[in-house]
Amino acid sequence: MSATVVPAPVPAHLRRRRVRSWLRGIAIAVVTLVFALPLVWMFAAAFKTNVQVTDPSVGLWFSPTLENFRNIVEAGQILRSMGNSLLVGVVSTVLSAVIAVPAAWAVGRFDMHRTGSLILVARIVPAISLLVPWYYLFAQMGLVGSYTVLILSQMFVSVPLIMWIMISFFAGLPVELEEAARTDGLSAFGAFWRIALPLAAPGTATASLLAFVFSWNNFMFALIFADDRTQTVPVTLFNFISYASTDWGGLMAAATLITVPVVLAAVLGQKYLVAGLTSGATKG
């Protein structure tokens, strides 16, 4: 007669760990579903007619059409707006990085805490409170409706954003590396250019990507300062909504088109984004 083998009870701490793992997985799935559903609906609606978009009985099973994309491309405004957004986003981000990265190095390396606090104040000042004086100033200079005013207004947000992110990166770099470079004959700027800047490349990529995404999505500045020639994509999307009706199919098609560059930038820069965020979370 063989003896019955009784399985050993699972320790309490392992059961708690397993429950926490299941709860964490469920929470992640719920959050992912909440954020993904609007994007899935937008992408599906881009291939529907206006009647199908407003019909709740039409779900994800329908006959897709490319008419919405054909109409907005033939109109020409969406492609011109995407070009404007790309131009403003790239130029403002590059200029902001050129200004903010060396400034962040100086603040982080020389413990300029008051300057860092002023940068934080610049980040929390509502940009809308500056629109009226800005508009008056730029109108007097004849810049309203130009790319220059859009780039400058974006830099007001991008420079403090990049600088605030990069301060922690430079403060966390070992100062001994720069001191060794200075001993070998490099100047302070030479040590920054050849030692500190390459080490902070992940942080620079992270901050620049976030600044570009903000510029691409910004609506308020473009609505006030742009004209028909310099109009960016958020304003173009707004024009699909009128008092009498809304072109839902065209709106969703345009939203899908302008979402693609941001998603591609995030996917292609994911390695630098993750590395930048994780390295910025530790110091020393």
Image: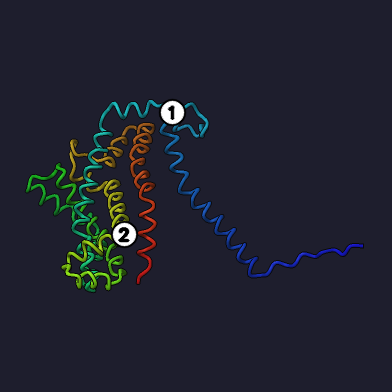
The reply to whether residue 169 is visible in this rendering is yes
Q: Position of residue 59 (x, y in %)?
A: 51, 34
Tell which residue pokes out farthest to the front in this image. Answer: 184
Report whether 53 appears left or right of 283.
right
- Tell me the quadrant of the picture where the C terminus can be found: bottom left
The reply to whether residue 117 is visible in this rendering is no
The residue that appears at 20% across and 47% down in the rendered structure is: 91
Residue corresponding to mark 1: 51
Asked whether 250 or 190 is in front, the reply is 190
Residue 230 picture quarter: top left
Residue corresponding to mark 2: 203
Q: Position of residue 249 (x, y in %)?
A: 38, 31
The residue that appears at 42% across and 38% down in the rendered structure is: 42
Q: Which mark is residue 65?
A: none
Q: Name the element at disc 1.
A: helix
Residue type at tag 2: Gly
Residue type at tag 1: Val
Tell which residue pokes out farthest to the right in this image. Answer: 1
Q: Position of residue 247 (x, y in %)?
A: 35, 32
- Tell me the quadrant of the picture where the N terminus can be found: bottom right
Can you tell which of label 1 and label 2 is closer to the viewer? Answer: 2
Report whether 53 appears left or right of 231.
right
The alpha-carbon separation of the residues under discs 1 and 2 comes to 47 Å
Q: Residues within 10 Å of mark 2 (few under 14, many from 20)?
A: many
Q: Residues within 10 Å of mark 1 (few under 14, many from 20)?
A: few
